[in-house]
Amino acid sequence: MPHAYSDDALTLARLLQEPALRRARIHAGRAGAVTRVEWVVPWSVAAGQDDPLTGVLVHAHPGELARDQVTVTRAAERLAACGAAALLVDGHQPVASDAVAACQLPLVTMADTVPFAALNRLVADLTLARETHVLRYGLTVHRALAELLYRGAELSALCSQLNRMSQRPVAVFDNQGQLAALEQGQPRTVEAADLVTAFAEQGDALGTRQAPEQLHPRTVGIRLADRELACIVTPIVLGGRHDGWILLLEESDDPHPHDLAEHRVLVEQAAPIVGTEMLRLRSVQRAKEQARGDFVHGLLHGRFATAEDISPRAAHYGFPVRSWFGVVVASGMAVPADVDSPARLQQVGMEAARLLSEQGRHTQAAMVGDVLVVVREAARRGTMGTPEAAAAAIGDYATALHQYLSRRKDQGGRPVRVTYGRPAVGALAIPDSYREARMAHGLQQRLGLPAVCGFQELRVHAVLEDVAGSRTGRSYATDLLAPLRDPSAGELEATVLAYIAAGGNVNAASRDLHIHRNTMLYKLDRASRLLGMDLRQAENQFAVWLAHTLDLLATTTAEVDRVVSPG
């Protein structure tokens, strides 16, 4: 079966241009002149079998068709049903031409006698000659591109070579639809913005919205701003991984078939070589991002002992070690496609680092597990004004980050939550701001805080943090809450905390818990007996609230310490 992407394959019309067949005539099925021919089978063989005959030219002598019209008609119907390319009869006009025509089978007759062996050899020679030409041209293209790749040429150089060989604009898109390279020589006839827009909007027509089902190039139409062009599109697949697309734009919407065939070979040979270069670039980029991520992790976890330790790495990334910095933590931004794609999450970090770039503040971002952590410069040393102004700048960035991540993620799943620590002076103080951001993040949902909040908004919780970590604080919380947490006590702790949160209002607390008021009173009386204090008194309510808060802070602090100082 001929390849669907080979427009210059041998056709019936092309075959009849040969000197030995120039006196032939097509009597029926003239549209079959464009039918592709791959080999020849004699009538005696083809008429007696039901195997597929796609691309087969059936050769017959007049004597083989000198039978009754019904027999010839049935044989012709069987050939047409099997997909035969055409029926060629040599010698003279067959008596059953009308029968063959009725079957919509292309019929060719000729006055000369052409033996089956001569016709078979002619078709074989033409087919092999074309295949040899394609292979030779493909080898030339492959050698030219491979030599560039071997010399370390980048993607733009490979596209330039494709442009020189085809004299057509050539573009490479990655698998995210981003334009990676565009080369068109002079004069420039295609605007990059128009091509990017067309690629994004016409993905269904170009076949670029889904993973490629087949690797061969295909010819499609593409609409640019002011005209329509034919476009040869081929996927870049290397090792089973789809990395993008190569587009070669023709000069019009109806290019010459020979040009199309040549350009198909060109992009087909280019795809694995361009894919190899994209793999190299991706590996280099990933190594750079990993090194930058290691630097950010070192800043967050205090792995640099002195400013001198930081300076060499900081100079490489242009990181101002003596500025004011705040750390922002965000969670819930991963979409389903991100879960198994570290590269996609890495891309989120890179985009987050570019937010509010007009403020001229240095920003570094890295993924810590599934949490995005951003080190944001609040202000340059000597120009930051007041600490309040620096804190406001970090708050503005946190709000912008929350808006960006909320727009990006799909509906459903965890909500996006963003917290930030207080600005600190110098790179060595970044772990302090990171710890505060993590503390705020750990308490944010438990305390019902806004989706964007800073450590300073914790207020009393921030003040009690040191007490919660002390032996006295832990002992106080454990001893006071132990009776309420006894398995036999039921859910008394939640009941007491709801009562305290409602300001001692029994009716409001019972509504919040969806229980009857009498049930609420019974549970409060029972809790008072277990605690040995009357919970209707404000000082006793405060005692329980303080114990719960110290216990919550101690638990959150332990979780944060495991993250901030892992081992």
Image (tube, grey):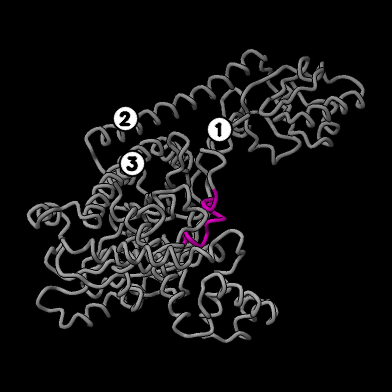
Are the residues at dot 2 and dot 1 in contact (C-beta closer than 8 Å)?
no
Numbered mark located on residue 9 in the image: 1
Q: Does the magenta stretch mainly form a helix, a strand or a loop? A: helix
Q: Nearer the viewer, residue 473 or 263?
A: 473
Q: Residue at x 82, y 35 (%)?
A: 103
Q: Nearer the viewer, residue 483 or 136?
A: 483
Specify few, some or many for label 2: CA neighbours under 10 Å numbering under 14, 14-19, or 20 or more.
Answer: few
Question: Which range of residues does the magenta coloring cover?
Answer: 198-210
The image shows residue 289, relative to residue 122, as above or below, that is: below
Q: Is residue 226 visible?
A: no
Numbered mark located on residue 143 in the image: 2
Quarter of the image where one finds residue 148: top left
Are the residues at dot 3 and dot 2 in contact (C-beta closer than 8 Å)?
no
Looking at numbered disc 1 in the image, what kind of residue is underneath it?
Ala
Secondary structure found at label 1 = loop
Residue 401 on image: x %, y %: 37, 70
Q: Is residue 33 left or right of residue 530?
A: right
The image shows residue 396, relative to residue 410, as above or below, that is: below
Name the quarter where the N terminus is drawn: top right
Specify few, some or many for label 3: CA neighbours under 10 Å numbering under 14, 14-19, or 20 or more.
Answer: few
Real-space CA distance between mark 1 and mark 3, rounded to the nearest whole angstrom: 22 Å
Looking at numbered disc 3 in the image, what kind of residue is underneath it?
Met
Q: Residue at x 55, y 66 (%)?
A: 411
Residue 490 on image: x %, y %: 62, 64
Q: Magenta stretch: residue 200 in it? A: yes
Q: Residue at x 50, y 53 (%)?
A: 337
Identify the residue under disc 3: 165
The tag earlier along the polypeptide, 2 or 1, is 1
Quarter of the image where one finds residue 78: top right
Specify few, some or many for label 1: CA neighbours under 10 Å numbering under 14, 14-19, or 20 or more.
Answer: many
Q: Magenta stretch: residue 496 in it? A: no
Real-space CA distance between mark 2 and mark 1, rounded to the nearest whole angstrom: 24 Å
